[in-house]
Image: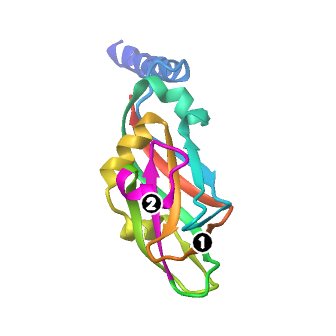
Amino acid sequence: MSAMKHLFRRPLILAGVAALIAAGCIVSGQFVILINWGGIVSTNTQLNAETVDLTEDETWQDHQEDIQKIVDVKFETTVKNNAGSVATGQLYVSDQDGLTYGQLAGQATLILSGIEIPAGDSVMISFTESAQYQQNLQTLLDLAETGLFYLYGVAENTPFNIEIKQGSRILVTFAAG
């Protein structure tokens, strides 16, 4: 008889756990958000920012109340150098929109640097490759936790004219539970 009880208990327990998960009562783990961005051109005299609003993503909305921390942020992007000389690409993050090139150092944080882009050419950076250019990751993670931030693509050498191509993506991994 005890063997018979054991056979019935296991499926009932599994069914109960499955029902709780389906009902949203047990939701923990790591989740990934993939945000499309790009299509911005910036020069040292006309700086454009990309607004990243994680709160519009369905996965973020589903787990917003349970987010414990942002685990990682990676970038996949194609950067085009529209100028006639080599550019060293950089990406800044800020909680402010509308910054000028001169304001970046004081009001934004450098998060990617050292991307060499030949004159008139493009460079594609994969999610994996973006880690080698990453700086100040904790600042980026903290800003991502707010759900809203602004990205500024520039070059460290002036004058510059670079374009973050449409189809670029940001991969945000967060823990919730």
First in sequence, mark 2 or 1: give its number.
Answer: 2
Q: Element under label 2?
A: helix
- Image height check: is 125 above or below 138? below
Q: What residue is at 39 percent from the left and 49 percent from the top?
A: 107
- Nearer mark to the viewer, of 2 and 1: 2
34 and 160: which one is in front?
Answer: 160
Q: Does residue 95 appear to the left or right of 85 in the view shown? A: left
Q: What residue is at 68 percent from the left and 60 percent from the top?
A: 39
Disc 2/disc 1 C-alpha distance (Å): 17 Å
- Image height check: is 5 above or below 21? above
Q: Residue 81 shows which numbered tag?
A: none
Q: Which residue is mark 2?
A: 102
112 and 7: which one is in front?
Answer: 112
- Name the kind of residue labelled 1 in the image: Ile
Where residue 49 appears, as percent x and y from the top left, is 57, 53
Q: Which stretch appears magenta?
A: 87-106
Residue 43 occupies which quadrant of the picture? bottom right
> Which quadrant holds the C terminus?
top left
Q: What residue is at 37 percent from the left and 46 percent from the top?
A: 141
Q: Which residue is mark 1?
A: 162
38 and 22: which one is in front?
Answer: 38
